[in-house]
Image (cartoon, rainbow, N blue to C red):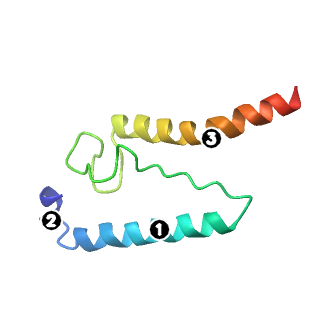
Amino acid sequence: MKFYEGPWPGIRSIVRQIEIYNQMLRELATKMLDITYIDVNEDLLGEYNADKYIDIVHFSPLGDKIMAKNVFKKLRPTITGEIRLKI
């Protein structure tokens, strides 16, 4: 993350705010039965200097693939369960 501190001196604060926001979303999702919280951070969080981001917000093609994998992994049981119910 040190690389990004030059152009964005407040980057550590921004990352911390995002962590707090994500925690709030996780807690809210546990209280709502019809909400599925998908934590997409697996293999992405803290990797800001890797080839997964093109800047502090946008994913590279590799980051896009990891994000899609994380979403699919979480949704797969729901999707396959719904398909089985309809057959």
| x and y percentages locating residue 24 in the rendered image | 51, 71
Residue 16: quadrant of the picture: bottom left
Nearer the observer, 58 or 74: 74
Dot 1 amino acid type: Gln
Dot 3 amino acid type: Leu
Dot 2 amino acid type: Glu
- Taking the spot 36% from the left edge, 50% from the top edge, the residue there is 58
| x and y percentages locating residue 9 in the rendered image | 17, 72
Nearer the observer, 3 or 44: 44
Q: Which residue corresponds to mark 3?
A: 75
| x and y percentages locating residue 13 in the rendered image | 27, 74
66 is higher (above) or lower (below) than 10: above
Nearer the observer, 68 or 32: 32
- Taking the spot 22% from the left edge, 73% from the top edge, the residue there is 10
Q: Which type of secondary structure does the marked residue at label 2 adopt?
A: helix
Q: Earlier in the sequence, mark 3 or mark 2?
A: 2
- In this view, which residue lies farthest toward the right? 87
Q: CA distance from mark 2 to mark 1?
A: 24 Å
Q: CA distance from mark 3 to mark 2?
A: 35 Å
Q: Which residue corresponds to mark 2?
A: 5
Nearer the observer, 6 or 73: 73
Foreground: disc 2 or disc 1: 1
> Within 10 Å of the Cα at label 1, are there few (<14), some (14-19), or many (20+) other Cα atoms?
few
| x and y percentages locating residue 87 in the rendered image | 88, 25
Circle number at residue 23: 1
